[in-house]
């Protein structure tokens, strides 16, 4: 049987409120499942309607395609992995309850395990309570199923199958052989560095249970996606768009088309239905309008969270009101073609900035090149290193660090001195190409950490200079902001740099503004500070090294 789980015309369909879900492979099984689910009673809704009476077509379509993927003759499920991303208040907990209770009722395997995995106890309760209420409102279900509130467990008295709702940790899921798994609020798992292994444990039972499925359900994150959430969402989008052919994975993602985001049409409340398929049912239009107005008044941070949770807008750079102005123009200047090799090939002169280097810091490197034959076109490439102790002390950032490591932007050091050796080696490459003008670093802090390593690598001492920090970097901030705004400064589009730029908080200092590590908290900004050091040197307009005037400048270095 030929089928596809991609939906390449999703942008048109989602705007026109057409279904994003394919027809079920086995309609008779799909019909049986919906017949069961539609009889569940919603006791927390006015009038206590049946689910079938209160549901909009998209929810029915999703239930049908999940269960309609099982071949009745063999019991094998031909689509066994689903990702559902909807905005907040779109009945996600109700969907979890209905699908998993239906799976418990339709399951044929004796003593099967069914699992709803939630990141916290509170979220677990949100899924368990609707299941309990469905059962209590139906005499037949009450006779067939044993409810144990304390353990958040439902037991089928005939098959011995159990449905458990648990708050996740490695001990909770270790050794599980669940046939059916519902993972709630996947974006929260993205903040946990070990979540990938935990989910692998939780879903491992599917390898020997061909009738099983796993459903990942989530809203968008109020922070840039990270960890297992970022990976799973990226994969789901590529399946949806037809870039990856995976007929056993079905994505259902309610988000704005890129063209609407670029035009700002996601800010028009009349378009909110696009990411809220339950618009007019569990999602109240008047309440969303009220929350929109309140978030606008409460500032950019509150508005960012509103966009993420109620409109499923993926957050890129942090939109705090105290952000660095350069952050407003950062993302649009990313260019994946920019690498260190690109700079060495295309640029006539290079400046280097370094910052950080403590065991609890990132050691940030910035390489800025000026394009050959120009005075105002620049390319920037960054890398950073972090010691394991820095990862351990920043548990809240660990999943992001691992993402950056996979992207090749961050090196997690494995042996003493590795960071200084690799940093010095990269800079030596620039020097050997005859492009290096100067290296700038914090004279009181970073200088003491990396100076010896640079000298031992063969970098002339006269090329290593101190860059005054604090308010004296205000000029570099202004230069970088203007170059980003005009598009003259392009960078490698590094996720690590986007994160670091988003972390940079600006505080007033007399008549100036400055970025400080103290104001930025746990979010590291060492790569940004390294960039400002490189920008400071490039702003001196160094000559290409073949120029005699430049050689004279090296002999008589300027202290900045």
Image (tube, rainbow, N blue to C red):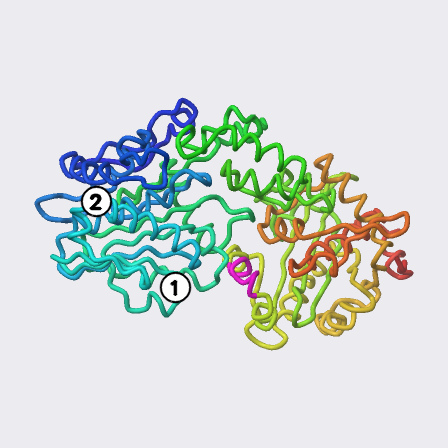
Q: Is residue 156 left or right of residue 258?
A: left
Q: Position of residue 287 (x, y in %)?
A: 52, 32
Could you tell me which secondary element the residue under label 1 belongs to? Answer: helix
Q: Position of residue 154 (x, y in %)?
A: 24, 57
Q: Nearer the viewer, residue 481 or 395?
A: 395
The answer to which quarter of the image holds residue 445 is bottom right
Q: Where is 309 relative to 165, above or below?
A: above
Q: Which residues are magenta?
A: 395-402
Q: CA distance from mark 2 to mark 1?
A: 38 Å
Q: Position of residue 134 (x, y in %)?
A: 27, 46
Could you tell me which secondary element the residue under label 2 belongs to? Answer: loop
For label 2, the residue is 138
Is residue 542 at least partly visible in the picture? Answer: no
* Category of crowding for the residue at label 1, using alpha-carbon neighbours closer than 10 angstroms: few (below 14), some (14–19), many (at least 20): few
The secondary structure making up most of the magenta span is helix
Q: Nearer the viewer, residue 91 or 338?
A: 91
The answer to which quarter of the image holds residue 42 is top left
Residue sticking out furthest to the left: 73
Is residue 69 at least partly visible in the picture? Answer: yes
Q: Where is 393 relative to 239, above or below?
A: below
Q: Position of residue 389 (x, y in %)?
A: 59, 73
For label 1, the residue is 197
User: Which disc number belongs to residue 551?
Assistant: none
Q: Is residue 106 left or right of residue 59?
A: left
| Quadrant assignment for the N terminus | top left
* Category of crowding for the residue at label 2, using alpha-carbon neighbours closer than 10 angstroms: few (below 14), some (14–19), many (at least 20): few
Residue at image point 14% right, 43% down = 71
Q: Where is 415 relative to 296, above or below?
A: below
Residue sticking out furthest to the bottom: 416
């Amino acid at each position: 049987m030929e089928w596809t789980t991609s939906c390449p015309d999703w942008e048109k369909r989602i705007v026109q409120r057409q279904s994003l879900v394919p027809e079920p492979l086995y309609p008779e099984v799909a019909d049986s499942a919906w017949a069961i689910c539609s009889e569940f009673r919603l006791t927390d809704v006015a009038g206590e309607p049946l689910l079938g009476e209160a549901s909009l077509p998209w929810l029915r379509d999703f239930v049908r395609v999940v269960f309609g993927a099982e071949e009745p003759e063999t019991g094998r499920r031909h689509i066994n992995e689903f990702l559902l991303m909807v905005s907040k208040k779109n009945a996600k907990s109700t969907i979890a309850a209905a699908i998993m209770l239906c799976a418990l009722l339709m399951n044929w395997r004796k003593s099967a395990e069914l699992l709803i995995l939630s990141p916290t106890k509170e979220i677990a309760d949100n899924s368990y309570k609707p299941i309990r209420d469905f059962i209590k409102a139906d005499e037949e279900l009450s006779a067939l199923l044993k409810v144990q509130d304390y353990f958040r467990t439902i037991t089928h008295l005939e098959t011995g199958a159990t449905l458990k709702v648990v708050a996740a940790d490695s001990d909770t899921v270790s050794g599980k052989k669940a046939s059916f798994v519902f993972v709630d609020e996947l974006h929260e798992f993205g903040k946990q560095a070990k979540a990938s292994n935990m989910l692998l444990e939780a879903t491992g039972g599917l390898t020997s249970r061909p009738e099983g499925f796993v459903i990942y359900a989530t809203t968008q994150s109020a922070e840039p996606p990270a960890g297992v959430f970022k990976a799973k969402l990226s994969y789901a989008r590529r399946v949806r768009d037809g870039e990856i052919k995976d007929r056993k994975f079905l994505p259902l993602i309610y988000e704005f088309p890129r063209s609407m985001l670029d035009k700002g049409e996601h800010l028009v409340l009349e378009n909110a239905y696009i990411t809220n398929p339950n618009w007019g049912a569990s999602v109240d239009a008047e309440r969303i309008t009220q929350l929109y107005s309140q978030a606008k008044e409460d500032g950019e941070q509150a508005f960012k969270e509103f966009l993420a949770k109620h409109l499923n807008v993926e957050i890129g750079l942090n939109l705090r009101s105290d952000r660095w102005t350069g952050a407003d123009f950062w993302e649009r200047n990313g260019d994946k073609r920019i690498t260190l090799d690109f700079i060495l090939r295309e640029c006539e002169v290079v400046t280097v900035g370094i910052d950080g280097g403590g065991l609890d810091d990132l050691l940030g490197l910035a390489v800025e090149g000026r394009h050959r034959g120009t005075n105002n076109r620049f390319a920037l490439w960054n890398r950073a290193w972090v010691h394991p102790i820095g990862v351990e002390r920043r548990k809240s950032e660990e999943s992001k660090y691992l993402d950056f490591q996979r992207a090749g932007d961050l090196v997690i050091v494995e042996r003493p001195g590795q960071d200084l050796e690799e940093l010095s080696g990269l800079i030596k490459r620039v020097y050997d190409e005859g492009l290096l003008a100067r290296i700038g670093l914090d004279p009181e802090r970073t200088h003491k950490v990396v100076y010896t390593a640079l000298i031992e690598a063969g970098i002339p001492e006269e090329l290593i200079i101190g860059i005054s920090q604090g308010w004296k970097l205000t000029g570099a901030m202004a230069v970088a902001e203007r170059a980003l705004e005009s598009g003259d400064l392009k960078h490698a589009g590094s996720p690590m740099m986007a994160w670091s730029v988003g972390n940079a908080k600006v505080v007033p200092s007399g008549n100036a503004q400055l970025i400080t590590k103290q104001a930025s908290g746990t979010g590291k900004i060492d790569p940004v500070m390294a960039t400002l050091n490189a920008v400071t040197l490039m702003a001196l307009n160094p000559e290409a090294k073949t120029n005699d005037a430049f050689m004279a400048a090296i002999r008589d270095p300027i202290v900045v």
